[in-house]
Amino acid sequence: MVVPKDVLYSPDRKWIIENVGAEPDVEVAAVPGESLQGRDKQLETAVAMLNRALDRHSTTVPAAPPALPSYPAKGQVPGPGF
């Protein structure tokens, strides 16, 4: 038997119970046997939520900078970079 040696409470004055993890934002029921079929409902739900968030907050990718030459032009060797 292991006896807890710490007692914790949260900023909103509630006792924190041991062995209780973070509450999920969205609960997704695990369906027995889906993993044997190569499916993961929790992962699929998370990816769908992220895709919806990306659709709402689309971003643009900046243009790439100009390509650097492989070797500097003759006589234009840069000095130390530090």
Image (spheres, grey):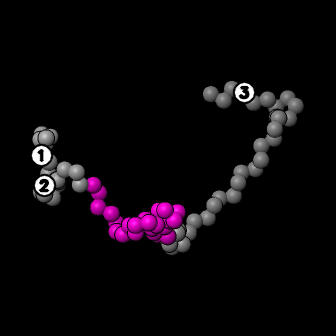
* Numbered tag placed on residue 74 in the rendering: none
Q: Residues within 10 Å of mark 2 (few under 14, many from 20)?
A: few
Residue 2 falls in which quadrant of the image? top left
Residue 57 in sight in this render: no
Residue at (47%, 62%) from the top-left corner? 35
Please state the horizontal and vertical placement of residue 43, each as a whole percent of the image: 46, 63
Q: Which residue is mark 3?
A: 79
Q: Tell me which label, 1 or 3, sits earlier in the chain.
A: 1
Residue at (49%, 62%) from the top-left corner? 36
Which is closer to the viewer, label 1 or label 3?
Answer: 1
Q: Mark 3 near mark 2, Cβ–Cβ under 8 Å? A: no
Q: Alpha carbon of mark 3 to alpha carbon of mark 2: how far?
A: 62 Å
Residue 49 in sight in this render: yes
Q: Which residue is mark 1?
A: 7
Q: Residues within 10 Å of mark 3 (few under 14, many from 20)?
A: few
- Decide which of 51, 60 is in the foreground and name it: 51
Badge 3 marks a residue whose secondary structure is loop
Look at label 2 and name its amino acid: Trp
Q: In the rendered structure, which segment of residues is drawn in magenta?
A: 21-49
Q: Is residue 50 above or below residue 63?
A: below
Q: Which residue is mark 2?
A: 15
Q: Mark 2 near mark 1, Cβ–Cβ under 8 Å? A: yes
Please state the horizontal and vertical placement of residue 18, each as a whole percent of the image: 19, 50
Please state the horizontal and vertical placement of residue 10, each as a whole percent of the image: 17, 54
Q: Alpha carbon of mark 2 to alpha carbon of mark 1: how far?
A: 8 Å
